[in-house]
Amino acid sequence: EQEWPDGLRSFIYLVFLLWCFFGVMVVSDVFMAAIEKITSAKKRWFNKEANRHQTYLVWNPTIANLSLMALGSSAPEILLSIIEIVSGDFFSGALGPSTIVGSAAFNLFGI
């Protein structure tokens, strides 16, 4: 790979980078569709006082979107910490807590 011409390497890296962004786009699209499906759930019950059926939302849309988006944006850090703890005989390494603290700082200040 080091012996390849710079133009060819640049082109291959660019194609791979675009392929990775496309993969993130597809996963994000599926994730958002799942969030919409979950948060649009409704229940129907019979109101005896009004003598009719009433429909209500199971999730408060604001709370549901905020909590599910927080989980989705922090999922990589949480999974990285879990992998590190499991592979390190259930002792925390240097990577796990740092990633979660860094992610929390970015979520508070950046987002």
Image (cartoon, rainbow, N blue to C red):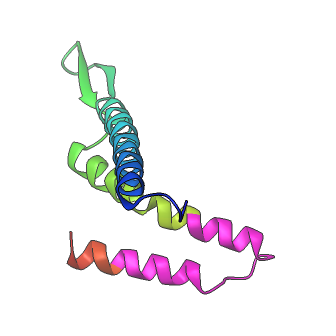
Residue 77 on the magenta span: no
Q: Is residue 87 left or right of residue 38?
A: right
| Residue 76: image location, x then y, percent | 48, 61
- Comparing 85 with 21, the one in front is 21
Residue drawn at (21%, 49%), measured in percent from left and top?
62
Q: Is residue 110 above or below residue 22?
A: below
On the rendered image, what quadrant is the C terminus found in? bottom left
Expressed as whole percent of the image width and height from the top left, the position of residue 52 reads 22, 12
Q: Quadrant of residue 71?
A: bottom left
Q: Residue at x 38, y 34 (%)?
A: 30
Question: Can residue 90 be found in the magenta stretch?
Answer: yes
Is residue 83 or residue 53 the one in the foreground? 83
Furthest toward the bottom, the residue is 94
Identify which residue is drawn at 60% across, 87% down: 94
Where residue 61 sits in the image (x, y, percent)? 23, 43
Q: Which of these two is toward me, 80 or 38?
A: 80
In this picture, residue 32 sits left or right of residue 61: right
Where does the image place residue 16, in percent across and percent down from the top left?
42, 48
Q: Where 76 sits versus 109, above or below?
A: above
Q: Which residues are magenta?
A: 80-104
Vertical placement of residue 78 versus 16, above or below: below
Residue farthest toward the top in the current orientation of the protein? 52
45, 43: nearer the viewer: 43
Dominant secondary-structure state across the stretch colored magenta: helix
Query: How many marks can you see?
Result: 0
Quadrant where the N terminus is found in the figure: bottom right
Identified at 40% across, 52% down, the residue is 8
